[in-house]
Amino acid sequence: ADNRVLEALLRKWEGKVDPKLGHVLCILENERHGLGLAQDGTGYVLYKVSLTLLVSNPLRGEICDMIVSEATPAGLFGRVGPVEVFVSVGQMHPSYAFVNEEPGVFVSQDPAQRDISVGDCVRVQILG
């Protein structure tokens, strides 16, 4: 019964987006309380459970690390956890210029800053 309870919880929660919690990445812990209550005529048993979930919910203004997945003349695309993020070229430091290589690269004219290409980790602020 414990495996079936866990399977039902995984189907309901993992990989889903909850408006209050954010993106549910995985179930860390679950605990079943009591013996359960049989539903008449169905063969199902209802259990009261408590869960500990790992969630990701980047908030406006939060500083996050983004893994760059694509660099285009319009800006950078990447992921912050499960969330797809776009950084417009207008939000980047003015010393960066796009170089149309395969894959694209943003090259900095400032020697103190490194170039940005696919696979790099950059720090971003969530604006909206």
Image: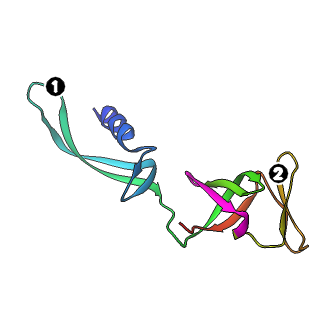
Q: Position of residue 86 (x, y in %)?
A: 64, 58
Residue in view at x 84 percent, y 72 percent: 95
61 versus 46 height, above or below: below
Q: Position of residue 60 (x, y in %)?
A: 51, 69
**Left or right, residue 59 beside residue 9:** right
Q: Amino acid at mark 1?
A: Gly
Residue at far left of view:
40
128 versus 54 height, above or below: below
Q: Are there few (<14), some (14-19), or many (20+) residues within 10 Å of tag 1?
A: few
Q: Quadrant of residue 54?
A: bottom left
Asked whether 73 or 41 is in front, the reply is: 73
Residue 97 belongs to magenta span:
no
Residue located beneath label 1 in the image: 43
Stretch in magenta: 80-90
109 versus 47 height, above or below: below
Mark 1 in CB contact with mark 2 (< 8 angstroms): no
Q: Quadrant of residue 74?
A: bottom right
Distance Cα–Cα, label 1 vs label 2: 58 Å
The residue tagged with tag 2: helix, strand or loop? loop
Which scheme is used to colour this image of the protein?
rainbow
Q: Amino acid at mark 2?
A: Gly
**Predominant secondary structure, magenta span:** strand
Residue in view at x 73 percent, y 64 percent: 89
**Left or right, residue 66 beside residue 109:** left
Residue 86 belongs to magenta span:
yes
Q: Position of residue 69 (x, y in %)?
A: 71, 49
Circle 1 or circle 2, nearest the eye:
2
The N terminus is located in which quarter? Answer: top left
Residue located beneath label 2 in the image: 104
Residue in view at x 34 percent, y 33 percent: 3
